[in-house]
Image (cartoon, rainbow, N blue to C red):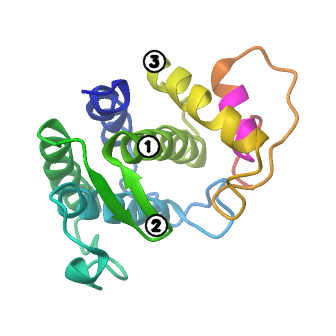
Amino acid sequence: MSEAIELIPEASRVVTELPLEGQWDRPTPCREWSVRDLLNHLTVEHLWAPHLLRGESLEQVGSRYDGDVLGDDPMGAWRRAITASVLAWGQAPEREIQMSFGTSSTTEYAQQMLVDLTVHAWDLARAIGVRPHLVPDAVEAALAYEKPRVGAGEVPGIFAAPVTTESESRVDQLVALLGRDPEWTPPA
């Protein structure tokens, strides 16, 4: 099992433990998304994971997760999705996964999911004004994965352009690499 797959459960708990209730309309560092929008994005990704890990195609999954999947119980929807996803990751064979941009290995897919969980946990924490307590090994794995990709110009459109930081914090370095100002706070 890859390190990224092993880190997904712990990284997902960071999101689950954030006190998001009642803060759904707050802006996030992801300019177009509120807290609810961002949690919906994460939930959709983890609803897709079991299907893709079983080898289903994009066409087989179809549009069933388009739009708002959170309903009246956003945190309940997140918990159900992440539970199913974590279980699927624990049983995931190494295979080629069909993605919107082409095929990817299970290991590569896990690395992408770990980066997304880690960075979006930071986004959500900052949006609600709490200090993010990210998983240090997940931060290191995300940095190791993204540094060569960003340096090679492979992530345009996925993340904003890198932001310069002089911070020694590995979390600050990660979020800056992925286009976030480490000092971001929600507008007053």
Nearer-N-terminus badge (1/3): 1
Tell me the amino acid under the disc marked 2: Gly
Task: Please state which amino acid type lies under the numbered disc 3.
Answer: Asp
Q: Residue at x 88, y 35 (%)?
A: 164
Label 2: few (<14), some or many (≥20) within 10 Å? few
**Which residue matches tag 1?**
117
Query: 39 above or below 132?
Result: below
Instruction: Give residue 95's position: percent from left, percent from top.
Output: 25, 49
Which residue, given by chain and number where applicable, does mark 3 sit on? Answer: 137
Determine the secondary structure under disc 2: strand
Image: 109 above or below 90? below
Q: Do we see residue 121 in this rendering?
A: yes
Which residues lie in the magenta part?
A: 173-180
Between 143 and 123, the one nearer to me in the picture: 143
Mark 3 or mark 2: name the one nearer the start of the chain. 2
- Position of the C terminus, as image quadrant, is bottom right
